[in-house]
Image: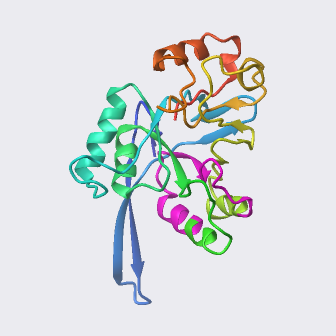
Amino acid sequence: MNIQPWSTEDPNLYVARLELKNPEGKTVQSRETRIGFRTIEFFPQDGVYLNGTKLVVKGVNRHSFSVDGGRATSAAMSRQDALLVKEMNMNAVRSHYPPDEHFLDMCDSLGIVYMDELAGWQNGYDSKVGPKLVKEMIERDVNHPSIIIWSNGNEGGWNYNLDPLFAQYDKLQKRHMVHPWADFNDLDTHHYPTYLTGVARFTNGYKVFMPTEFMHAMYDQGGGAGLRDFWDRWCTNSVCRRLYLGIL
């Protein structure tokens, strides 16, 4: 078969049909799901590679919210948001919780990579509830080609005891896992870096650089610097050749 890989530029998808048959060979249940074929690799002090090519990630944070429906979402809303991301010349999205599946479907269709995150704000889930949520999230989302990284919590909200579960349930792909805001697992995801960023975090480039939040209204620390100012500074740095730059 001449399989065409899935990528952000060419999001090729295929339909897999699954059938459950009884002992007599009669189909008692069937399901069709869209899948994509691609490879995801992470290399310390280098970055994330999609199908053997380094992926420069430019993305945004997204909440499941609209001025019209509040927290009530729809496939139409997901499509509108995903198209807006593409129109901004972005290729990635992160949320503070697993999104509706129809948003992941849109990411699969349009070629947007996604960081799938175990919910949590400033306090991580304990070791009783957390394992159940990790299992549910990964078992539901594991076959979406758009998902390239797992995220355990947000800022102070991670539970180290949950970390091994991500690889356990993502047995085939074992996608990389991060703790947002932390310098963890060879990814520096420090939130709200200053415009100058700092010698240790960027100029020396000792870790893959991927701030999972920045340009916060309260913590921009950029003295009025905008998105273009940050991006131009990062991309003109001499170590940019081996950094995985993410604005998420």
For image coordinates 71% across by 22% down, the residue present is 202
Q: Within the image, what quadrant is residue 45 found in?
A: top right
Between 50 and 63, the residue placed more toward the observer is: 63
With 74 as the anchor, is 55 left or right in this view? right
In the rendered image, residue 154, in percent from the top left (x then y), is placed at 59, 50
Given the current orientation, which residue lies at the most extreme left position?
Answer: 68
In the rendered image, residue 107, in percent from the top left (x then y), is placed at 39, 44
In the rendered image, residue 230, in percent from the top left (x then y), is placed at 54, 18
Given the current orientation, which residue lies at the most extreme bottom position?
Answer: 24
Q: Within the image, what quadrant is residue 123 found in?
A: bottom right
As displayed, is residue 179 above or below residue 183? below
With 9 as the anchor, is 147 left or right in this view? right
Between 14 and 138, the residue placed more toward the observer is: 138
Between 156 and 206, the residue placed more toward the observer is: 156
Q: Is residue 141 magenta?
A: yes
In the rendered image, residue 70, in percent from the top left (x then y), is placed at 28, 54
With 75 as the anchor, is 148 left or right in this view? right
For image coordinates 66% across by 35% down, the residue present is 190
Write the start and end of the magenta stretch as one range.
134-161
| Colouring rule applied to residues | rainbow
For image coordinates 65% across by 16% down, the residue present is 196
